[in-house]
Amino acid sequence: MPPVWTTPHRTAPVDAVVTLPGSKSITARALILAAIADGPSRLVRPLRARDTDLMATGLRSLGTTVEDDGTDWLVTPRPLRGPADVDAGLSGTVLRFLPPVAALATGPVRVDGDPRLRDRPNAGLLGALRDLGVGIDDGGRGKAPFAVHGTGRVRGGAVVVDARESSQIVSGLLLAAARFDDGLDLSLTGGVPSMPHVDMTVTTLRAHGVDVTATERGWRVCPGPIGARDLVVEPDLSNAAPFLAAALVTGGRVTVRDWPEVTTQPGAQLDRLLTDMGATVDRTAAGLRV
């Protein structure tokens, strides 16, 4: 007989304090902006996981210095150049955040990854980069593997983007847009699957001094500086859900450390959702207690 897996269970109430890893979404955005900022940056407590390690390695392959300092990353921008090979693994953020940066490099940058990565749609991003004057060789697939043929600059300007496949397409373009010659005037055709993650991108850009405004159909990013910024990466609030749920199902108490007062993470809705489900939720000096 195949082995039987018993679901986790607890006969007594839990009483725990949990420290979560850093947010993957925030770490990915911080790495991209640090790589094209006006000076060095320190990322404090970034998520160390396969996706973020691949992002850091991909930026290193383009010439950016990403150094370990304990658990921190020290990121120093350098002239972006190819040829380079980027392994995106299975990461959607690497697949869609790194090509607009690669377009700013001189020389070809080839992006590929695990076999299943080649199933992930990316036509909206590659089509937008082509419309902005970037050379893209994807064999007409709209998926990996593909090559970005950078010339050291991107014209930028107005572009219509189909981002129905992923909000990461919008975020990837917005993150690099301040380095385009004419910035970016991005208009959407169709919807965006996860607007909170685009809102996170816009908030992050503004924190770096980038001039970005919402328009009737999308967003406009003005060309200009990207301020270097040391950043303490917030804990990944979505990862808090199973731990906080344990408090409800056992009638116990769980505290998640370092819960931010203000955040763009969609996981911040957990305090409201758990209250609606009958929990008592308090903010304490230690964090969020359920």
Image (tube, rainbow, N blue to C red):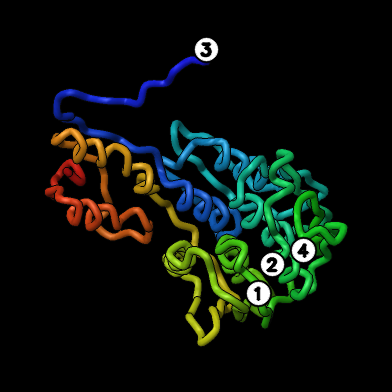
Q: Residues within 10 Å of mark 1 (few under 14, many from 20)?
A: many
Q: Secondary structure at mark 2?
A: helix
Q: Position of residue 57 (x, y in %)?
A: 65, 40
Q: Amino acid at mark 3?
A: Met
First reached walking from the N terminus: tag 4 or tag 3: 3
User: Where 57 falls versus 165 (above or below)?
Assistant: above
Is label 3 or label 2 in front? Answer: 3
> In the figure, residue 222 lies in which quadrant?
bottom right
Residue that numbered label 3 is attached to: 1
Residue that numbered label 1 is attached to: 161
Q: Position of residue 92 (x, y in %)?
A: 61, 51
Residue that numbered label 2 is attached to: 124
In front of the other: 55 or 280: 280
> Are circles 2 and 1 on residues that touch, CB within 8 Å?
yes
Residue that numbered label 4 is attached to: 152
First reached walking from the N terminus: tag 3 or tag 2: 3
Is label 4 or label 3 in front? Answer: 3
Q: Amino acid at mark 1?
A: Val
First reached walking from the N terminus: tag 4 or tag 1: 4
Q: Residue at x 19, y 37 (%)?
A: 247
Q: Amino acid at mark 2?
A: Gly
